[in-house]
Image (cartoon, grey):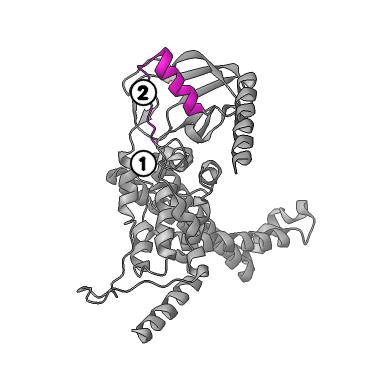
Amino acid sequence: MKRKFLLARETSEINLARAKNDSSDILLNIYRGGPNSKSEKSYDSYRVPVSRWTTVLDALLYVKERLDSSIAIRFSCRMASCGSCGMKINGIPRLACYTKISELGTDTITCEPLPNFPLIRDLVTDFQQFFNHHKKIQPYIQNTHLDPTMERLSEFKQTPEEVDEFLQFSYCIKCGLCYSACPTVATDTKFPGPQALAQAYRYFADNRDDSAQKRLDNVDHKHGIWRCHFAGSCSMVCPKGVDPALGIQMLRGHLLSITKKPKKKRAELREINREGS
Amino acid sequence: MKEGTIMKIHYITGLAALLTVAIHIMMRVVVPFSVSLEYENVVANYQNILYALLLESVLILISIHGFNGLRVMLLELRQSDKWEKFVTLFTLIAMIAVIAYGTRTIIIVSGQSL
């Protein structure tokens, strides 16, 4: 046991030494400005020492701590769970905490605020509109067959196959990267965006939810699901491996009455539950 | 009408237009292309009731599909109730006008003597 511990310590020391040797400098360009900045885009540039595992967020925090404390950044968990540090890094929407500088393959890194969001200051954007779209699709399970008195608590039983129907969509962390990459959102502010539509499918496909028709009606309007051009950029930028474009196409399939399978399944399950109770 | 219904019509007319235009082109290549566009040939085509019906359906399908496509594009340009009403009305009137004018042409030419 002691030997194992010593070995682990030695390895970590070697890694640290290697990391120190690997360190180099990069040029970090950070967008500066507020919503009323009428002039051309302005950037402040900083030289930042980085090593093999330095993330863009680490580099930004280095600048904020040691070089310029006035930079506005939003971050929290530093492990791609909270979705706070979304920004455009070298032209692509990414999470700063999830993007290693070494994987960008360049010595010049440019950080800009997320497009399609109103700017607050520097790298911080306003998520109000994004969350409003999310709220509109009613992102919670609705089940009218539940006993309102809740005299007898019961579980919703699901098979692994039923969970698979929506599981990947439940990994969404609401970071807004898909929303900022969407070309339709760029022109149509009433369009719910890939995040909200994928969540609409997530609850639609969940067999614990029985408001399928309501959910379909909710996205079936002039600025709704039909405005998706299927560019697929939402799925490309998602840091959690969610495929919003797939969710949108699946929901469209149901609206066009091409796909009926989960509906059938849901009806069967309801029947089984009724018999069980 | 629900947007979903409009889009169903949009997709169906798109597919049907593809089919009818393909038939139309196939019928053109039965004879050498330059011959098929001769005045007598064209008028004779119009006087064939099946061909006139095919042309009419191409006209209707493409007008519905095309003008709805235009409506969708214009709706994305700006977002206001006034604009949406204007765009819907404009594309609807334009679609009816194009179909009416095209139908008139088909009817007149099909009744014309060679």
Q: Secondary structure at mark 1?
A: loop
Numbered mark located on residue A189 in the image: 1
Pick the quarter of the image with the N terminus of chain A: top right
Few, some or many C-alpha atoms within 10 Å of disc 1 (few <14, some 14-19, many ≥20)? Answer: some
Amino acid type for the residue under numbered disc 2: Ala
Q: Chain of mark 2?
A: A
* Residue B29 appears in the rendering: yes
Give the residue at the far front of this rendering: A2
Residue appearing at x 31%, y 70% in the figure: A143
In this orientation, does residue A225 appear?
no
Q: What span is in magenta?
A: A56-76
Image point (41%, 64%), residue name = A204
Give the farthest residue toward the bottom: A275
Return the residue nearer the eye: A90 or A106: A106
Residue A73 colored in magenta in the image: yes
Quick one: A94 or A12, which is closer to the camera?
A12
Query: Which quadrant: the C terminus of chain A?
Result: bottom left
Percent x, y of residue A44? 45, 14
B16 horizontally vs A207: left or right: right
